[in-house]
Amino acid sequence: MNRRTKIVATIGPASEDEATLRKMVRAGMDVARLGLAHNSIDEALVRFHRIRSVAAAEGRPVGILIDLPGPKVRAANFGETGVDLSTGDRLELRVGTDRSTRDVIEVDYEHLLRDMHIGDRLTIGDGGAVLEVTDRGDDNLIAEVSSGCRLRGRPGVHVPSDRLQIPTPTDQDLVAVDAFVEAGVDMIAVSFVRSAHDIRRVGTEPHPRGPLIVAKIETRAAVDNLPGIIEASGAVMVARGDLGNECSLEDLPHLQKDIIRQCIAGGRPVITATQMLESMVDSPAPTRAEASDVANAVFDGSSALMLSGETAVGVDPANVVRTMSSIAHRADEEMDYGAWARKVAELRMTSVEKEPASVTDAMTLATWRAAGELGLKNIICISGSGFTVRSLARFRPEANILGFSVNEATVQQLTLSWGTTPLLMESGGTNEEMVAGALNAAFRAGLVESDELVGILAGSNSRALATNVLRIERVP
């Protein structure tokens, strides 16, 4: 069995050179993430084109996700080596963007003094450091460290979302969207989403004409408005760092499971992110707890797992990807696919009012059942927009999904879809022509064998609005 759960790896100073990128692709990176919070648009565009070049040279589709900074507040730079904060330390919090030290942390948020009050707890760096505001001056806050850690770079500073005075997406976000849409980016992650309206404000064309929009669930408001956000988005990210700041830690694992369940039921890929192999920023191996966290995210139903600092600034990015790939692969082998698919079938019922989506729902469910009954190794899924592939993937079939499309943008976006090998078709046409072309392409690529029985799911022709034909064929 091939690894089914996809890997998203963040590209940063430790991984931006061609040699490292090539090693990461070979180690199993499916999607490269470019976080714009730490880089200019021009710097990110250089990395974007370098990733495209490496992926083309490797002959493998690698999706590219840009992660918009959003209204997330950040501290001024602590430097690459970082600063240690210890429990009991007292320090100042000031508005600024110059630099942060052990004694003075500058925060890039002009309303800091107004929005934070004595007694408030401030978390920095995905909850790594916790500070309690104890006093205030004319131009600063005094805080005591109640939980310390080492802080590097420009970590996020959590301001409760119900107090934050900045809209999502920001004006700077929209400038970045325009630049990367012009460059042909595959996916855009929107930070600090609070409602479906925030997703609509991005303003891009629906995918695949535009990028796949990924909603980051990291606020209590997003949890409360989750059904509408899922409906408005192309995919979802469980951003556990800030979400853990807004919700109690004991609730976080259960929220993760519920968000994933709702996303998969709706046919949306879902990424589980934040601190998955955090110790590998400095260490060649993860902790036992981290390995368990990765495996459990697979069992929860994650479509993809995300690496952040581990590959952006870690000591060996390719080794991190390889390690996550190995853990996820082993978890994939232990996944109870039958039980999972039965749950999904119960969660999402078709409705004649939602045609043509309901037709695709019914056909993908039928395909999962047929593949299981016949013991198929491969399902060829032909889709213009990728909707059919994503709908089939939510059932987690044991068969491999070979996702064919005549649309190159769709192929790139399918790099995020669970269990899917994305493949570009040379042309569309009638159902007979598409089936023959997909079978030949899959055979030439060594993905199917002669005389193998395969399932084929497609529309009656390349212009069909719904997937309405299921065929069982032998490979010539």
Image (cartoon, grey):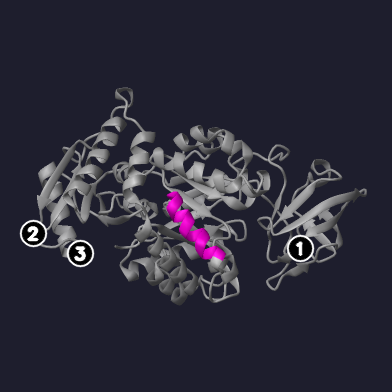
Residue underneath mark 2: 451
Which numbered marker is on residue 169?
A: none
Query: Mark 3 or mark 2, which has the lower sequence index?
Result: 3
**Which secondary structure is most common in the magenta stretch?**
helix
Mark 2 crowd level (few <14, some 14–19, many ≥20, 10 Å Cα): few
Residue drawn at point x = 19 percent, y = 53 percent: 376
Instruction: Name the residue rendered at 38%, 63% in the picture.
Output: 329
Q: Secondary structure at mark 1?
A: loop
Please tell me which residue lies in front, 340 or 389.
Answer: 340
Residue shown at the point (58%, 60%) measured from the top left: 275
Give the number of the disc on residue 148.
1
Per the image, the residue denoted by label 3 is 445
Q: How many marks?
A: 3
Quarter of the figure with residue 18: bottom left
Note whether 259 is above or below 439 in the view shown.
above
Q: Quadrant of the N terminus?
A: bottom left
Q: Nearer the viewer, mark 3 or mark 2?
A: 2
172, 273: nearer the viewer? 273
Q: Amino acid at mark 1?
A: Gly
Is 221 on the left-hand or right-hand side of 322? right
Q: Could you give the CA–CA distance between mark 1 and mark 3, rounded to whole angstroms?
A: 52 Å
- Where in the figure is residue 46, as x and y percent of width and height? 50, 65
Task: Give the spatial CA distance, label 3 vs label 2.
Answer: 15 Å
User: In the image, which residues are magenta?
Assistant: 289-302
**What amino acid is at disc 2?**
Asp
Q: CA distance from mark 1 to mark 2?
A: 62 Å
